[in-house]
Every structure is written in structure tokens, then in C-alpha cells.
Image (cartoon, rainbow, N blue to C red):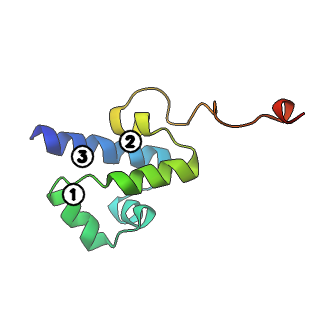
Amino acid sequence: MSRKKFIFSKIMVRLKKTSGAKNNTALASLLGFKPAAFSLRKKENSIPYEEIISYADKKGKSTDWIFFGRGKPEEDGFDQITPEEKE
């Protein structure tokens, strides 16, 4: 397995774990792709960075974890305001 293919696979596995997507069809839908388009990206090892970053931003997921496996799947929330900070 080439390094690029390995990286694509690892990213998609982590994305499935953090999103709860059960298969590639669900993952494609989550990222806004038709299954055939996602399959082509998989075949070409073309990582959909923009779509993954958009998903992570909307759902509070860690791109560091999705892309590199570092840290925790969820953001730490350091940029979120707590109720105490609102006062």
C-alpha cells in the first residue's frame, strides 16, 4: 500500500469514527459527495480537505485528530465561551 493511500485510509477511518458514519456511502453524504464521486476520490487518493475541515468546524471535531491522529476527536473548546465568562 502506498503511503498516500495509507494516509487517505487512515483519515477516512478516523472520520468515520468521529462522525458515526457506518460506511463509505454515509461518509460521502456527510461530506456532500455522491457515492460515485467519493469512490473516485478514494481510488485517486484525493483527500477532500475543504469538506473535512468544514465538517469539523460545524461539528466541533478536531482536524488535528482527523488528519493526523493527534489529540482527541473532540475540540477542547478553548475558543468557546463558558457561562461564567458571559457574566
Q: State the CA–CA distance, disc 1 to disc 2.
A: 15 Å
Tag 2: Cα neighbours inside 10 Å, few (<14), some, or many (≥20)?
some
Query: Which residue in the rendered view is the most extreme toward the left?
Result: 2
Q: Would you place residue 67 above or below residue 71 in this image?
A: below
CA neighbours of label 3 inside 10 A, class few (<14), some (14 to 19), many (20+): some
In the image, 28: left or right of 21? left
Residue at position x 85%, y 30% from top? 84
> Taking the image as drawn, is residue 20 in sight?
no
Q: Total marks drawn?
A: 3
Please say if the residues under marks 3 and 1 sit with CB atoms less than 8 Å apart: yes
Look at label 2 and name its amino acid.
Answer: Arg
Q: Secondary structure at mark 2?
A: helix
Image position, residue 72 (x, y; %): 50, 30
Relative horizontal placement of residue 48, taking residue 1 as reference (left or right)? right
Reading the image, the residue beneath label 3 is 8
Q: Residue at x 19, y 40 (%)?
A: 6
Crowding near the residue tagged with mark 1, few <14, some 14–19, many ≥20 C-alpha atoms within 10 Å: some
Amino acid type at image mark 3: Phe
Mark 1–mark 2 contact, CB under 8 Å? Answer: no
Residue pointed to by mark 1? 42
Whichever of labels 1 and 2 marks the residue nearer the N terminus, that label is 2
Give the image location of residue 65, x and y in percent: 42, 34
Give the camera-side residue of 1 and 60. 60
Q: Which residue is mark 2?
A: 14
- Image location (x, y in percent) of residue 16: 41, 49
